[in-house]
Image (cartoon, rainbow, N blue to C red):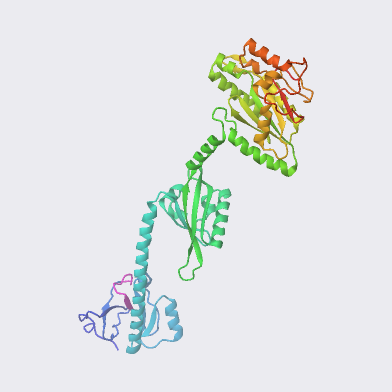
């Protein structure tokens, strides 16, 4: 049953549904149930349709007309209308051909059901469209927000493939978002760095939660920098399963440089760049622990530059500073790992010798002494000879490094060295003479007084030779100075 064009051109009610009709064979349209208004579509071919539902005439054979109706499928629901009932196989062929439904236009009830189904589908599609539109607006707002953030931000799916990023990440990687999306870390980073990122991503997505770590990155210009990665997993709202991750990068290169500078300043002497006193005792404590575990020997050298004040007075403090740097260069050459040294203050240096007993420490000290004497310091085209006095001692069991140095320095004070000039003591296997008077301007009466105290009463070398009645030296201590070794 078909209706005339006049019946289908009446003014629709407010709730009427507009339905399009297209017939390549120019057959009259079917009669629509109440609530639906039919409109002829005359566009050849069917490339556009202003209606959400369109009836497509397929005649009695069910053959799809030659028309480009696929162009309107995204916006229009197409119902194939036949003249009479079609076989099931023919209906399936029409559905496979791209129509959304098949109905016998002569059966008013079936046509009504088809139109109702179309309305439900359209309503459902409208809801989905609105949700997609809202999500698109939310996505665009989020993208605009993260694009204005200075930190690179990125998103990955469960397979570790990039699914989004912000402008800062594009600038970092040197690629537009269109090329970042769908790429893996191996497509945007050097292989050795990509392996680190891939392992960290997989660990995070397996364990869940949040991940923070530092790593090197390679910027688009090839510069290597250090960043802190802040990552968190994303989850499916329905299943709760991990479906990817979101991450950001904080460039900490300058902070790391500042940390290194602060660490250097805290550990090093500003003038010579040798270890300072504090760092020496930290490293020495660790070395002592290692020595205790392996029962290895540990020795200390205390080195002092002879008549250093005369260098400053004669050539100026700039020359004195340069002379100390010259000495540090010699110490670096003579003291290889694991041995260390530090500037204790002024012209005094501490040396820590791991795995060295007293005799080995003495051999090293002798090498240092000879190196200082044979390699003069060149300043303003003048060769300035330098000499050093060195004390050596082994670290005893249960003794702290500071106690070893204090014990050594107790025998290494100026009065003691003055008293030792020209003498070798029987209780010390090998003692090297000190030359304190070379840099201490003493009066004749002071020297005579010191010598008088040394020989008073008996005319022989006393065994008690230190002020304050200190303990006699043992075989674990040795001293020598730059002029003579006995």
Q: Please say if 330 is above or below 438.
A: below
> Is residue 55 within the magenta segment?
yes
Location of the N terminus (image quadrant): bottom left
Residue found at x 40% / y 84%: 61
Tell which residue pokes out farthest to the front in this image. 457
Tell which residue pokes out farthest to the top in this image. 444
Q: Main secondary structure of the magenta part?
A: loop
Location of the C terminus (image quadrant): top right
Asked if one can make out residue 222 in the rendered structure from this viewpoint, the answer is no
Residue 289: quadrant of the picture? top right
Seen from the viewer's position, the closer of residues 320 and 344 is 344
What is the x, y in percent for residue 182?
48, 58
Q: Please say if 290 is above or below 328.
A: below
Residue found at x 51% / y 51%: 188
> Is residue 471 within the magenta segment?
no
Segment colored magenta:
44-57
Residue 49: quadrant of the picture? bottom left
Residue 389: quadrant of the picture? top right
Q: Please say if 307 is above or below 32.
A: above
Q: Tally the numbered discs.
A: 0
What is the x, y in percent for residue 252?
48, 45
Asked if one can make out residue 284 in the rendered structure from this viewpoint, the answer is yes
Seen from the viewer's position, the closer of residues 349 and 158 is 349
What is the x, y in percent for residue 370?
70, 21
What is the x, y in percent for residue 412?
67, 25
136 displayed left or right of 7: right
Seen from the viewer's position, the closer of residues 377 and 71 is 377
């Amino acid at each position: 049953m078909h209706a005339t064009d006049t019946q289908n051109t009446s003014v629709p009610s407010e709730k009427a549904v507009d339905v399009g009709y297209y017939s390549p064979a120019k057959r009259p349209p079917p009669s629509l149930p109440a609530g639906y208004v039919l409109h002829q579509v005359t566009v050849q071919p069917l490339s556009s349709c202003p209606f959400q539902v369109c009836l497509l005439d397929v005649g009695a054979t069910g053959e799809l007309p030659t028309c480009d109706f696929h162009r309107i499928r995204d916006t229009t629901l197409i119902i194939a209308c036949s003249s009479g009932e079609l076989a099931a196989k023919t209906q399936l062929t029409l559905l496979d051909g791209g129509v959304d439904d098949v109905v016998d236009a002569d059966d008013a009830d079936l046509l009504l059901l088809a139109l109702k189904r179309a309305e439900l589908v359209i309503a459902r599609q409208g809801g989905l469209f609105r949700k997609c539109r809202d999500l698109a607006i939310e996505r665009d707002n989020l993208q605009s927000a993260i694009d204005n953030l200075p930190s690179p931000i990125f998103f990955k799916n469960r397979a570790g493939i990039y699914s989004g990023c912000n402008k800062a990440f594009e600038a970092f990687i040197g690629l537009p978002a269109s090329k970042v999306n769908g790429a893996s870390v191996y497509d945007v980073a050097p292989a050795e760095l990509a392996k680190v990122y891939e392992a960290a991503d997989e660990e995070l997505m397996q364990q869940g939660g949040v991940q923070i770590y530092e790593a090197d990155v390679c910027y688009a210009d090839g510069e290597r920098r250090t960043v802190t990665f802040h990552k968190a997993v994303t989850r499916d709202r329905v299943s709760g399963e991990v479906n990817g991750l979101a991450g950001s990068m904080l460039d900490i290169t300058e902070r790391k440089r500042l940390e290194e500078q602060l660490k250097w300043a805290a550990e090093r002497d500003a003038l010579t760049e040798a270890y300072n006193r504090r760092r020496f005792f930290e490293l020495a404590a660790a070395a002592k622990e290692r020595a205790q575990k392996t029962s290895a020997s540990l020795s200390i050298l205390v080195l002092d530059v002879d008549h250093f004040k005369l260098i400053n007075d004669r050539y100026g403090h700039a020359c004195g500073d340069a002379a100390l740097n010259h000495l540090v260069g010699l110490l670096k050459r003579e003291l290889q790992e694991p041995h260390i040294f530090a500037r204790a203050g002024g012209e005094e240096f501490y040396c820590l010798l791991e795995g060295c007993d007293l005799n080995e420490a003495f051999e090293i000290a002798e090498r240092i002494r000879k190196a200082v004497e044979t390699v003069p310091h060149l300043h303003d085209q003048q060769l300035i000879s330098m000499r050093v006095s060195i004390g050596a001692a082994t670290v005893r069991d249960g003794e702290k490094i500071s106690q070893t140095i204090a014990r050594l320095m107790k025998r290494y004070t100026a009065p003691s060295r003055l008293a030792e000039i020209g003498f070798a003591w029987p209780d010390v296997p090998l003692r090297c003479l000190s030359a304190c008077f070379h840099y201490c301007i003493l009066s004749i009466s002071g020297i005579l007084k010191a010598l008088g105290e040394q020989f008073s009463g008996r005319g022989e070398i006393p065994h008690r030779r230190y002020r304050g009645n200190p303990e006699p030296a043992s075989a674990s201590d040795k001293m020598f100075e730059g002029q003579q070794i006995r």
